[in-house]
Amino acid sequence: MSDAGAPVTGTIAFLGLGHMGGPMAVNLVKAGYRVTGFDVVPAALDAAREHGIPTAGTAVEAVAGAAVVLTMLPSGKHLLDAYRGAGGAPGLLEVAAPGTMFLDCSTINVDEAREAAELAVAAGHRAVDAPVSGGVVGAEAGTLTFMVGALPEDFEAVKPLLEVMGKRVVHCGAHGAGQAAKICNNMILGVSMIAVSEAFVLGEKLGLTHQALFDVASAASGQCWALTTNCPVPGPVPTSPANRDYQPGFAGALMAKDLNLALNALQSTGVAARLGPLAAEIYDTFAAEGGAGRDFSGIITDIREKSEAGKSEAGTAGH
């Protein structure tokens, strides 16, 4: 076990080599870290090996002897099952060497993050939750933002690793605080993207060009990331997914997932929120009706189509 606060060294077992995890692991290898990867999807393992990441045959094999177990998994259930063991497989907490650093970068419920940390600490290990923001582009470029929940000494120990994969690393508080910050941030993002998209569709109806509305709002009180970086219409921000037919980016299914995590937290805490739950409902519908694999800014096309349908229905009713 490393001294308290000292940077962790040794092999990193990287579990979850998908669209986000794969590029993150590549950046660690490029920085000189020893990484052993594993994923349940054979194509992800093939891609990892093509990028110079050694892989293991099982998660248990990857974890054996590792100093850090970094997880990037789809849900809290996947994480807790991996930690405890499921389907006859031993739990990672059981097979890891004493004092292993369990660093989870998945996006999961706050309660699940706290439970995972409690399990790790009870098994004699260290635990950090560090969900990310920045999407696939940020993962590839090493410019992610990490929101970290950890003891201060554990934060200092993993910070050098996180700085390889991201440009901003924020210690948000104790276990679970990273997840709390992530879902609060993404609730703001989801609500603001809907508002920006509705404003552009309204502007279209009122005869405004996209560029005119952008030039005003981007320099006025309507300014926000959903407008100036991920603008939902093509043109004003050439790098936004709208210019690539809404190829993600940050997919609609992921926004729906994160907003439902926020909804769970709102319900458990009794916060009298109205826009967060409505945004979750809107993105659930968007994902179910074909938007799951499109960038979340594609919600503007849904708003536009429903506006035209509503206009047609109103016209028919008037005859």
Image (tube, rainbow, N blue to C red):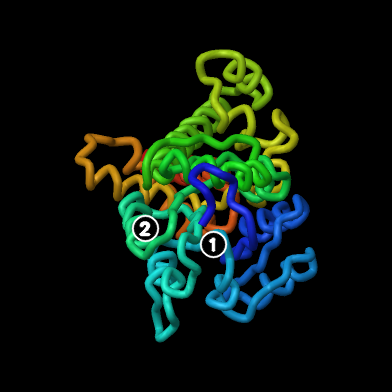
Depicted 231 relative to depicted 279: above or below: above
Q: Residue, x 56% and y 33% (percent of image)?
A: 226
Q: What is the number of the mark on residue 284?
A: none
Q: Amino acid at mark 1?
A: Val
In this orientation, which residue lies closer to the viewer: 108 or 273? 108
Per the model, the C-alpha gap separating discs 1 and 2 is 14 Å
Q: Which residue is mark 1?
A: 69
How crowded pointer 1 is (Cα within 10 Å; few <14, some 14-19, many 20+) is rated as many
Q: Which residue is mark 2?
A: 121
In this orientation, which residue lies closer to the viewer: 256 or 37? 37
Horizontal and vertical percent for residue 234? 69, 36
Horizontal and vertical percent for residue 2? 53, 52
Please tell me which of labels 1 and 2 falls first in the chain.
Answer: 1
Do we see residue 308 in this rendering? Answer: no
Asked which secondary structure carries label 1, the reply is: strand
Depicted 296 relative to depicted 185: above or below: below
Instruction: Please identify the residue farthest to the left as the structure is shown.
Output: 270
Horizontal and vertical percent for residue 108? 41, 54
Q: Residue, x 33% and y 52% (percent of image)?
A: 114
Q: Amino acid at mark 2?
A: Val
Asked which secondary structure carries label 2, the reply is: helix
